[in-house]
Image (tube, helix red, strand yellow):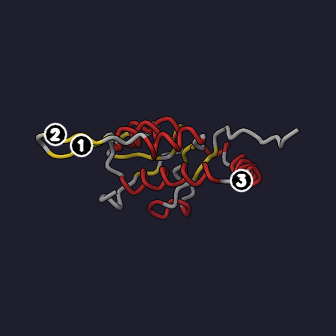
Amino acid sequence: MGKDYAAVEGWIIFIPEFDDNRDDPDPITAEIKPMTVREAQRRGGNVTAKNTRDGIRTNAVDIRQQTFCGHVRNICHLRVGGKDITTPEELLDTGLNALVDELDAAITDASRLSEGDLKNCKVQSDGLVGRTAGTAGIVVKNSKG
């Protein structure tokens, strides 16, 4: 009988470093989900290119956005232009590229964690669940994203 490995599943509450967020009393949080091996391979291996009259076009951005939207949810404490941002689709429309890039990197990193590391993340994040209610912080600095 071979080894039995735990499936990578579940959501992790992530607190981005973006704009000194971790020092904020009500930090921006988002739930992220690790990618499966198949999703990671699709993301890296299904990029196609076409030669168009406007130049070479690829589907890399579409694949990245699909992965991002499928692995981020429940964004809390983020307000841009007077509007609460709570979904990955809304976040992609803000222009906060540095925050999107950090969340994207966290998804990739979480996908590479060992079972023990994932358990530690879940234990640490459980204490944050009660902090999801509160006033959203207004992001005014780092307008370049």
**Which residue is drawn at the image coordinates 19% and 42% (left, top)?**
51
What is the C-alpha distance between the residues marked 2 and 3?
43 Å
Find disc 2 in the rendering and name its residue. 52
**Which residue is drawn at the image coordinates 39% and 57% (left, top)?**
98
Check residue 57 in the rendering and tell me which mark sits there, or answer none.
1
Task: Point out the frontmost of discs 2 and 3.
Answer: 2
Quick check: 140 above or below 134?
Answer: below
Question: Is residue 113 at least partly visible in the picture?
Answer: yes
Residue 10, position in %: x, y? 67, 38
Residue 19, position in %: x, y? 44, 62
Of callouts 2 and 3, the N-terminal one: 2
Check residue 114 in the rendering and tell me which mark sits there, or answer none.
3
Looking at the image, the residue that sits furthest to the right is: 1
Q: Amino acid at mark 3?
A: Ser
> Which of the pair 48/79 is nearer the observer?
48
**Which residue is drawn at the image coordinates 52% and 40% (left, top)?**
72
Looking at the image, the residue that sits furthest to the left is: 53
